[in-house]
Image: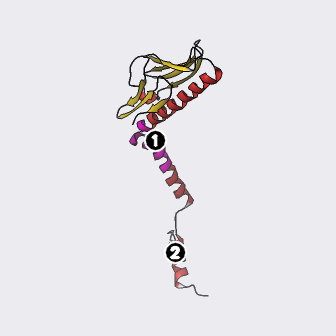
Amino acid sequence: MPLSPRLAAGWARRQAGLPNRGHSRGFTLIELILVIVITAALAVFALPKVVDTTLWRLRAFGDELQSRHQAMLRLALQQRRPIVETLSATGVSWAYGNGTAIATLPCPATESPCIAEGGSRTVTFNSANSGATTTSSAADLTVTVAHSSYSQAYVIAADTGLIYPLP
């Protein structure tokens, strides 16, 4: 039985060690996996160096500062005991009035110091078990989270202890 011209050409190519063009469609699994591995390696190692993540880290720090500040204000009122918040250039810490540490929020490691105002300042929630909030300056405190080109200011109200971002 004679072979069709197409089958004969394929058989001749196989005998010569050449790939059969009629059946080579798409990519092999190995080629696809290599492309995925190379893309993943670039995403893991090259992308953080190309994309500036400072903005995201500092924004996350500011959001976490607001969240923990409000949580400590509520905790002081619920437990009916004073909690002292200490703000420094390298982060924020919270402790009970007797000095027992509750929590800390350090600046992101690559963006430290991240609070622009120098020195150590305090906010006392539930001061003297009165429910009032006092600040070390007896006035509203401004906390500016800043590093490089990013800057966001927050105000801690002296009378209520609430924290809110400035526009």
Range shown magenta: 39-55
Tell me the mark number nearer the camera, choosing from 1 and 2.
Answer: 1
Question: Image quarter for residue 111?
Answer: top left
How many labels were placed on the picture?
Answer: 2
Rendered view: 112 above or below 5: above
Please, what is the three-letter code of the amino acid marked with disc 1? Answer: Phe
Q: Which residue lies under the disc numbered 1?
A: 45
Left or right of 155: which side holds 28? Answer: right
The circle on residue 139 is none
- Percent across and percent down for residue 113 are 41, 24
Q: Nearer the viewer, residue 92 or 78?
A: 78
State which quarter of the image contains the N terminus.
bottom right
* Image point (35%, 32%), residue name: 148
Q: Which element carries disc 2, helix, strand or loop? A: helix
Q: Seen from this angle, which residue lies furthest left?
A: 149
Q: Which element carries disc 1, helix, strand or loop? A: helix
Rendered view: 92 above or below 12: above
Q: Earlier in the sequence, mark 1 or mark 2?
A: 2
* Image point (60%, 22%), residue name: 76
